[in-house]
Image: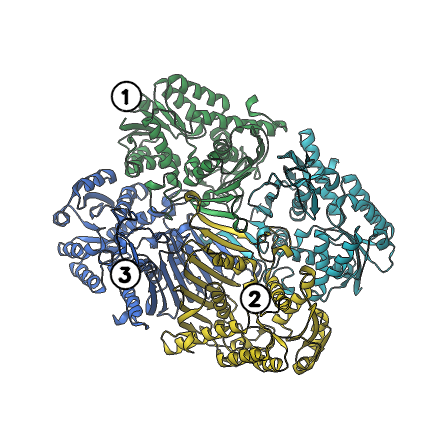
Chain colours: A cyan, B green, C yellow, D blue
């Protein structure tokens, strides 16, 4: 398989990130199958045509069914709003298309399971967009754990802190409306933390959470563009229907203690996606705002020189680094998507499921819902019971 | 009141820290009443005599009742093992002595309340040793909050991370035995976080926790000195009866969401006593390993230069800084005790209760026990219900 | 002018960086003229054809004269080895082509001036590749200075620290040979610092330097690829003919004191390209290894909260940030080249010279040679005297 | 020798720091000879009596000759203004007293040599107050170098950056007057850097410097206290006669390249006393504002986890740490003086010269003057030629 032909639904934030990944991949990873940017789909004809032109897609469409029906398309890449994932994914699977779906897989665990099952029955490849797995510094953490260099793991603590809602006048955009977004900080940010936990530390056996909507009502926006929008003070106010912040504690099957926090109210944190892992032989710390770095500590360093090392994951020894620039020359957010698509291409090359895939998506959704239930019922919940 | 005459019980870690505080105070705070180091008490005659000589106490004793009976002593400073606090404190109160007691006030909430009541009925001054309140950087955080410069508070997250138990061969010292220490990481480290939360953010309305003892059995030490000890591999192993790590979530009466973590298993963290507070106008971050610094963020900084500032709390504008060295010349751990004793002296000068006092001690104990109960019963507990 | 057609000479490190910039530009800056990747040129037919395919060039050639002669090419982009810049640039100017030349402009000041003169006489646009100017955090520093927010400038200190020569067995690659590379750390790294100084602080009136070649002889490599190579211990050793490290002090025309250091022997520094500027109203600090950040200090912050702020230059208020991702989502090394090419396109749009251009290249070369002379003659040298 | 009896001249900043060191030493280093605080001397009777009382000296005097004549005094500790050092030191030596002199030894190299010679001829112990040597993190750097763990040293770069003169209205205190202070930033701050260089890297073979007085005239203060003072805008202005900033480059006898910078105009730097050393096997970085930390890098760490480690020099493996608190509990500025005095006491115990002693003081003065000469004559100067 020399080429993999893509049809993509959605052209906003994630659509742009994915498009760029496809565009850059052949230049930096020439040994991988080449993604062919066949067709992009969106509801607004003018906009999607413009996007096709700007991003480099061969064709555009306003009907995603056209992508499904197109025999020249191998993969359906779903960047549509979350509430549209299910329908498209099921149709894609039914048509025998491989599927690359942005997170969340669906709005509910039940729907997620249905999608996974459909993909498995169709025998297609399926991938879910947990892009943070693909930062080289994160992959270094994974490697250190897998090689036993951190020993037995005791603690996992993670936070995804943003601050765009600290402004009480920020309007009621779609991300603050449950029926469209599905969830607030928990599903948007917490989902990434949960996947990271699964990736690095393993399965979660029980959870208990708490959440809050600090600002209960916000102005209805007069217009929305992408993630943002604007409202005047004359706009009416309506209820915010998603969580502003959700915290939870978890016990992992391995006995690890976990703590998780997602919030959009942490002034000064633009995008602090962070985790720390403590083991019997060492620790690692990561903060996405310095995504090229991993802080690493080893218990068996000489007694007088023990301390967290700031490792810049840009050396030849680090994942994907060979494709980029000399040591010390950093990469950015968009590179996580390029690496993600490299993984997808490599899965085609090696004819296997990519990681992360729908199984991971379902597992993540299971924990998300277990947390929700634990909040509603004010008790510990086992994700496996859902 | 020009002088305050002290009788102190205990001469180990805390005894040394308190002694040094009394010793240094008159030199750096000459306008405060002078603490007179009257008598030090300990069980071992030779050791306590040596300590008296080394630390600068006028006399020593092996019987704390002697301190209580001594009419030339104004304050009883209790640094004895936690399980001895109650008896000494009650006797001191009965004798009309002022009391300065290291944390914890007692091993149980019930005992703590009894001590507080005794002190109140005796009409004496009472102080509890929450020394971290007295780091200038912490006091800066307090000031910013009190002046409204952080706005409404949304989040409080705190951790006290140490790593001295990561070594599985560390022996079963007294701090790992419930009958002596009362508690493990929760009472030892978590107590400081809880007091910090009370000090900075206010009262806690409900909590839920989890805890773990990662290494269940450890070698019985052949000898113990201070906080440490040694054991050979031929020593028998016995059960660890305290928690290695305890986490909990909290909701404050003001609506703030809190998360707390105390552990002795965080490799690479020697003494990371840290908190972060996010408000509607700004945020602060503190880490005791860099105790002279407070990270401060303001939402209303000019748009192009927003970011956390590293404030070195050594300027004339910072608490206690005038007594020390020029800006940029840092102070250390022991200074928190000096400031604490300054507060005690000032309370005498102004004839008021010092802060923090036994009321704070009881309140802290209440949350500690609420967390314990929430762990045992696997449900949310309101401290006020205890 | 809707399109600008490029012919590029060279396809190694810089060739790749420039190609990617042309490739990405239309996607993220759709309002700029679109660079058309017409023809790429290199000496090895097979390699250049492969590069053309991989990078996305329409055609390839092994003879740069072909590019000069091609009427469908507007700009000659010169990434050839430094010792070939002059011949190509002069030919391009003679043919009326616009020129985008990687630094250094030429191996000597005399040659640089000849190239500048040729370009000016030809009336073409000319640009030189000082890409670090285009990091948003650097542009924020520039803005703060230009708006007077740092006040009068007193100090400029800069270092470009790398560590790839710390390994004594690293072979004698072309960059260690004066006849090919022209210079060592001074011309390679110091040149960037000098341009940064010119950009941010202004002209330099006098300099004095020192330099050293720590490891005098190295193994002749058996093969070289890009910047690297390999040699066995059986290889003969030959003399290193460039400087390993060069330091110099400078006085700026404005009275600012400057210090500069370039080295390839700073173990632990992969690519620490750093500067700090102190003024009467504030300071800024930059380190390329954390290229999205600028440390900013203001003298007139409230007394109790003064401190360096870590500004993440990814907000809408920062240069080029609108084209990329939401606040807190960082960009990487390659983006400096994309912004550089945006500047080139904008210069076409507005029909003006881009910044930085050959005038800057000559000025940089002047200081480089003044430093060299100051080292040889062990005295202060005024660049303007050269 | 169980006790060492001290007579001290001066009671301001340094007098306070030394007094505290004597006061604390017996408590934390009980195995050292005990310094007895015999007599303190100052010109103002009331103030010196108050200082004696506050700091804990047995007696006071307004005539330093009294200290020299007192047979019960073993050591003369000189904290008087720099221009009085010589006379007192010579008298002390003549009387056979041991001498502990604050830096600078004297105002000129000639005077310094005379003092050293007098001390040597008198056969007394002599120490000079380069206190920064005694930070545990600095001693760790020294240890790593001495044990060869950094390999051959290539670079030493150091800066002492303060910002108290950035305010143009700061008055013309004594430290800005050459006849009293002897020198400005160079002698005050640069001297510490030079001693650090000697201590860590060895002798300097040649230097060239530059300096500047940015603000030429300042208001004459209406009153001065310690290091500070105040002036109204009605005060007359007079000329600043010392340097505001001095930079120099150095070549060490070992071939190391050095760069040095001292300034009082680095906004945001309260007391950044920093150095970095790069060797063939590793590097270290130190910043006094985080004086408990040393950044350490080793070239032979595993390829995927190379990076600067933040070592907190508070472990049992670190110098002096055993005397203080558990790991992670930091110490402050004043502790450098306590350790310094420990060194003095240990020199008595072992009957040897302390380090650093007057030989170091002379060597430092030699480099200071060589730099001054290099500035005046605008050429490289060899300190050994002076």
Callout 3: few (<14), some (14-19), or many (20+) C-alpha neighbours within 10 Å? many
Residue shown at 29% from the left, 68% from the top: D370
Q: Position of residue D34 (x, y in %)?
A: 25, 44
Q: Looking at the picture, do discs 3 and 2 lie on one chain?
A: no
Residue C89: percent from left, percent from top: 59, 79
Q: The residue tagged with tag 3: helix, strand or loop?
A: helix
**Which corner quadrant of the image does residue D144 belong to?**
bottom left
Q: Which residue is mark 1?
A: B71
| Residue tagged 3 | D360
Query: Is disc 2 on the same chain as disc 1?
Result: no
Parent chain of label 1: B
Q: Nearer the viewer, mark 3 or mark 2?
A: 2
Density class for disc 1 (Cα within 10 Å; few <14, some 14-19, many ≥20) is few
Looking at the rendered image, the disc whose residue lies closer to the viewer, 1 or 3, is 3
SS at badge 1? loop
Is disc 1 in contact with disc 2, using a CB cutoff of under 8 Å? no
Q: Provide the secondary structure element on which disc 2 rests.
A: helix
**In this rendering, would B256 be left or right of A336?**
left
Quadrant of residue A36 within the rendered picture: bottom right
- Residue beneath label 2, please? C131
- Place of residue C173 in the rendered image (x, y in percent of width and height, measured from the top left): 55, 76
Distance in Å between CA atoms under marks 1 and 3: 55 Å
Label 2: how many residues lie within 10 Å, few (<14), some (14-19) or many (20+)? many
Q: Nearer the viewer, residue A266 or D199?
A: A266
1 or 2: mark nearer the eye? 2
Asked if labels 1 and 3 share a chain, the reply is: no
* Quadrant holding the C terminus of chain D: bottom left
| Parent chain of label 3 | D
């Amino acid at each position: 398989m020399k080429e993999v032909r893509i049809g993509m639904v959605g052209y906003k934030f994630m659509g742009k990130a994915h498009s760029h990944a496809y565009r850059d991949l052949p230049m930096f990873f020439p040994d991988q199958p080449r993604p062919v940017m066949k067709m992009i789909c969106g509801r607004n004809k003018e906009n999607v045509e413009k996007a096709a032109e700007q991003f480099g897609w061969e064709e555009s469409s306003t009907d995603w069914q056209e992508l499904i029906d197109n025999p020249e398309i191998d993969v359906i890449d779903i960047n549509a709003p979350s509430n549209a994932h299910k329908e498209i994914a099921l149709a894609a699977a039914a048509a025998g298309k491989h599927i690359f779906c942005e997170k969340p897989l669906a709005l509910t665990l039940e729907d997620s399971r249905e999608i996974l099952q459909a993909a498995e029955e169709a025998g297609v490849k399926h991938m879910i967009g947990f892009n943070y797995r693909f930062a080289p510094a994160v992959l270094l953490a994974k490697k250190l754990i897998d090689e036993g260099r951190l020993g037995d793991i005791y603690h996992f603590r993670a936070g995804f802190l943003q601050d765009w809602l600290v402004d009480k006048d920020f309007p009621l955009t779609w991300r603050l409306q449950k029926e469209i977004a599905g969830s607030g900080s928990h599903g948007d940010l917490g989902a990434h933390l949960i996947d990271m936990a699964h990736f690095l530390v393993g399965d979660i056996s029980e959870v208990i959470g708490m959440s809050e909507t600090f600002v209960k009502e916000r102005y209805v926006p007069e217009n929305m563009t992408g993630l943002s929008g604007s409202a005047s003070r004359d706009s009416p106010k309506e209820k915010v229907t998603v969580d502003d912040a959700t915290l939870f504690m978890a016990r992992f099957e391995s006995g690890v203690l976990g703590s998780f926090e997602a919030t959009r109210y942490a002034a000064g944190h633009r995008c602090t996606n962070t985790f720390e892992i403590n083991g019997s032989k060492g620790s690692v710390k990561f903060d996405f705002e310095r995504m090229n770095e991993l802080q690493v500590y080893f218990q068996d360093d000489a007694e007088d020189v023990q301390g967290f090392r700031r490792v810049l994951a840009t050396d030849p020894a680090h994942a994907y680094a060979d494709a980029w620039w000399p040591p010390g020359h950093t990469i950015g957010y968009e590179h996580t998507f390029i690496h993600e698509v490299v993984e997808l291409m490599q899965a085609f090359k090696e004819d296997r499921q990519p990681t992360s895939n729908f199984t991971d998506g379902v597992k993540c959704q299971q924990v998300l819902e277990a947390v929700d239930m634990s909040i509603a019922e004010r008790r510990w919940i086992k994700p496996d019971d859902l």
